[in-house]
Amino acid sequence: MATALDIAKRNPNAASLAVSDAARAAGQTALSIEKTAETTVVAGAAPGGASLIGLTRDQLKDSLAAIGVPERELKMRVAQLWHWIYFRGAKDFSEMTNMGKELRARLSAAFTLARPQVVSEQVSKDGTRKWLIRMPSTGPLDKGAEIECVYIPEVDRGTLCVSSQVGCTLTCSFCHTGTQRLVRNLTSAEIVAQLIVARDSIGDWPDATPPDGAFVPSDGGRFVSNIVFMGMGEPLYNTDNVIAAIGVLSDNEGLGLSRRRITVSTSGVVPQMERLGAEANTMLAISLHAVRDELRDVLVPINRKYDIKQLLDACRAYPGLSNARRITFEYVMLKGVNDSDADARELVRLLKGIPAKINLIPFNPWPGSKYECSDWERIERFSEIVFRAGYASPVRTPRGRDILAACGQLKSETEKLRARARMMAEQGIGAEGVYAVGNGE
Ligand code: SAH
Ligand code: SF4
């Protein structure tokens, strides 16, 4: 079941305002809020053709039917596979001892349990881990996309920052991902596979143990207890696959993450927000970053399509919103741009009546970025105003600086980018989404 996927075409909202990079280079940037996708890729149900890793129940059912498993057995066989793949973390069909030898032989002849390739793993002094993961090629035009995934352990939780797209079609002016040219949606399997890779690496399966010296939560819970969609890409431009992936991630008979511990961060794709709440029932984070439309139009250009009022109305209507299930508003602190006392007061005024948390994110500069991070005193003062108005306003401590634990900033698609990443390493540039973690419980 192969589907041709062209992000720019698939996304009806994108089409009217998408402009080519050539037009952007020619200075026609006033209307450009999105880039067109660079390539059209063919994304199959199983990345790499035959791995079952990351598949939904329906996709597993189709795979089993394709090798001749009779209809009447399908449900039971899917349940067995599900348990082995997602509960136990099986890496080989031979482990699946409650399935007959003959079926196991047929499975291994047709499929694998291969994970996407871990190109590199870096471990920070503070325990943060970053993986560069290469997805198998999905067709002749796809070289095998590389994405980053970051694990941030704390005493009482472990948060995985996952990507939803390779690159991003949007062009937020402070975000490095927005400068990357190659864009494609990740399949739901590729999204789920990021958690499988992380669990393999930190020994987060029954009977597995973490590597020597690894920092993992010590509260007796899962090592990965929370997931944030704060890596590369705009999750709500890939809503179908994100929702399907969340279904797999939160399934109680498998990976079993609580939906309340999954947070989807969006730059404000208003028409998709209701659907996310109704179908995925996860926590929501909004990349607000500005309190006036003129400024948000520049920082988060999707604002030209869905302005602050429309965005906040959609927040008020978010299914399941309550004081126990607040929306997180992310606000990156940009020196002299959005960090005045008046901005803080306006932020509080705008969010009135919305059960909210405010996450102040120190701006994480990158080579060529035109902004600076606000001074620490300014961030404290801003935070104080927000706090006095009754909001918890944690300022995220940068994590994993020594390994550049960035979701998105450092994906090395080409040698040129690799060189740039090295340069960033030398300059000690750190994460972006990593600042913004901390969701729900
Ligand atoms: N596309 C989605 C999710 C990925 S970005 C979104 O925009 O919400 C995750 C968070 O990191 C967003 O709030 C984003 O605005 C923020 N971010 C991006 N670049 C950053 C940078 N250089 N410094 C600090 N935060 C950044
Ligand atoms: Fe894309 Fe989010 Fe970066 Fe904007 S902040 S360019 S939406 S990843």
Image (spheres, helix red, strand yellow):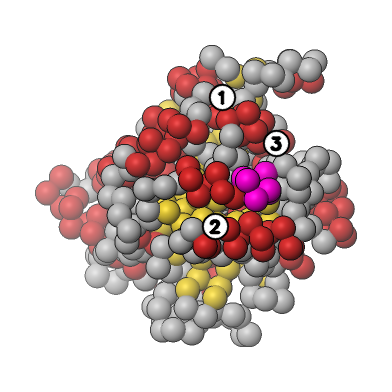
**33 relative to 428, above or below:** above
Q: Nearer the viewer, mark 3 or mark 1?
A: 1
Q: Position of residue 324 (x, y in %)?
A: 32, 61
Q: Does the magenta portion include 339?
A: yes
- Give amino acid for label 1: Arg
Query: Residue under circle 2?
Result: 386
**273 relative to 307, above or below:** below
Q: Earlier in the sequence, mark 2 or mark 3?
A: 3
Q: Quadrant of residue 441?
A: bottom left
Q: Position of residue 33 (x, y in %)?
A: 62, 25
Find the distance from the CA under tag 3 to the CA under tag 1. 14 Å
Which residue is at the front of the view, 91 or 216? 216
Which residue is at the front of the view, 299 or 243? 299
Q: Earlier in the sequence, mark 3 or mark 1?
A: 3
Range of residues picked out in magenta: 338-343
Q: Let me know if residue 199 appears in the view.
A: no
Find the distance from the CA under tag 2 to the CA under tag 1. 26 Å
Q: Position of residue 374 (x, y in %)?
A: 75, 54
Query: Residue under circle 3?
Result: 173
| Numbered mark located on residue 304 in the image | 1
- The local secondary structure at tag 1 comes to helix
- Give amino acid for label 2: Val
Which residue is at the front of the view, 107 or 238? 238
